[in-house]
Image (cartoon, helix red, strand yellow):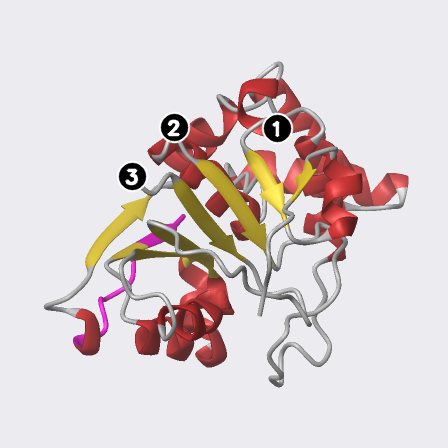
Amino acid sequence: MENNKVLVLGSKPESNLPEENVAKIYAANGAAERATDYRKKYLANTLTCIVGAREFARNEHVSRRIIEAKPENFIIRSGVIDIPLELKDHTKLIFLSNDEQWNFQSKFFTNKKVSLFLSEIFHQLKFFDKILHILKFIKNKNIWGVSTGFYAILLALEENPESKIIISGIGMQGGKQFYKSERSNHFVYDSRARVDRFLINRLLKKYKDRLYTLDPDLAKIANISQWKGNFF
């Protein structure tokens, strides 16, 4: 029987991997390392890594994990990088402009770009900071939208319209990454997680019905099904 399951990986600490042979894997940022671990057990799949251009350029802990994972596809959000020599003959590199990644996101949500715009209000907690944040991204014409983990979910939904999407390591609660680095010791993702929580509840039903998560917190936050299989 044709494999109709796809795995999306994020970097939430202490996350499990499903005991399920999937056709494709999508990994956000440093979660590429978890894809490498998964592929040691299940070999017949393709890997797509997604990362922001600035994150790849400035965070060696992320770039190293992606290079070592040797993805078949490598998607760069909002910018351009030089493809690492280690990936040159193996990996297809895809660059997305800010407008391209913004337009792609909008079609998944009720009210489309209106929801994306409103979501940025939740990036900051204080009223004055909210105003400054909105003015900044209007001035720079650089609206990020969902986190890279959430973007990986949207990409999996788009490219695999008949598949069940299994999510591991994405909790939308903020916090730190599973791997330790100088940056992750102090950097948390609470701001972008608030944006994600706003938008996951505006995800169109036809997409949400195909999502399954290993994380009980995400199941509750997003009102999606919890995956019931075994894990390791």
Left or right: 162 with respect to 106?
Answer: left
Q: Is residue 70 above or below residue 4?
A: below
Residue type at mark 3 is Glu
Residue type at mark 2 is Glu
Span colored in magenta:
75-85
Upstream in sequence: badge 2 or badge 3: 3
Point out residue 10 in the picture as x, y percentages from the top left corner: 56, 59
Residue type at mark 1 is Leu
Q: Is residue 180 above or below residue 164?
A: below
Quick one: SS at disc 3?
A: loop
Q: How many marks?
A: 3
Left or right: 126 with respect to 204?
Answer: right
**78 in the magenta segment:** yes
Point out residue 151 in the picture as x, y percentages from the top left corner: 50, 43
Residue assigned mark 3: 2
Left or right: 160 with respect to 228?
Answer: left
Upstream in sequence: badge 1 or badge 3: 3
Point out residue 41 in the picture as x, y percentages from the top left corner: 38, 72
Left or right: 116 with respect to 67?
Answer: right
Query: Within 10 angstroms of label 2, few (less than 14), some, or many (20 or more) residues?
Result: few
- Residue 162's mark? 2
Q: Is residue 98 above or below residue 62?
A: above
